[in-house]
Image (cartoon, helix red, strand yellow):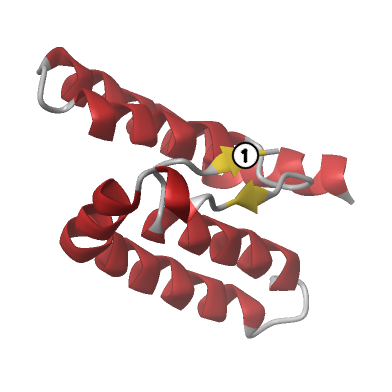
Amino acid sequence: MRLIGNIIWFIFGGLIAAILWALLGVLLCVTIIGIPLGLQCFKFANLVLFPFGREVRIVFEKHPIANILWAVLFGWEMALGYIGIGIFFCITIIGIPFGLQWFKLTTLALFPFGAKID
């Protein structure tokens, strides 16, 4: 299921999303102030390319202030969007595996600083 899910995900938007996240990361890394945010965008690009079979481990204690600032400024909007997309996919039986991947992105969207993708 992992291989088939990753292939379908890659074809139907994973590649485009990964490219967009990587471009945003590059744009943020051009500025000195945006480098920490740009590095988090690369995490999203990495996960959104092939999410099946991967896990997100949140290590909140590593950067608590950065995680709180991210969650207040960007994270909650992203998390709500990912939850909405995940619920939309989970409405059908066929879409449930893809909805679960969107929920995985929700956890990364809330607290990306210090998160590990295994």
Does residue 61 appear left or right of residue 7 in this picture? left
* Residue at figure coordinates x 26%, y 67% from the top left: 77
User: Considering depth in this image, is 72 or 2 the residue closer to the camera?
Assistant: 72
Please give the name of the residue rendered at 70% of the width and 38% of the height, measured from the top-left corner. 118
Q: Residue at coordinates 27% horizontally, 61% vertically from top-left?
A: 71
Question: Residue pushed farthest bottom?
Answer: 91
Vertical order, 20 against 88 (above or below) = above
Mark 1 Cα-neighbour bin, 10 Å: few <14, some 14–19, many ≥20 = some
x 21%, y 18%: residue: 29
In this view of the protein, which residue sits in the foreground, 34 or 2?
34
Residue 23 is situated, as x and y percent measured from the top left of the image, at: 29, 24
Tell me: residue 1, above or below residue 117: below
Q: Count the labels in the image.
A: 1
Name the residue beneath numbered marker 1: 117
Q: Amino acid at mark 1?
A: Ile
Q: Residue furthest toward the front?
A: 61
Instruction: Identify the element where label 1 is drawn.
Output: strand
112 vs 99: above or below = above
Q: Quadrant of residue 86?
A: bottom right
**Front residue of 102 and 56:** 56
**Location of residue 112 in the rendering, given as x and y in whole percent from the top left corner:** 41, 47
**In the rendered view, does 62 fall on the left or right side of 88?**
left
Q: Quarter of the image holding residue 8?
A: top right
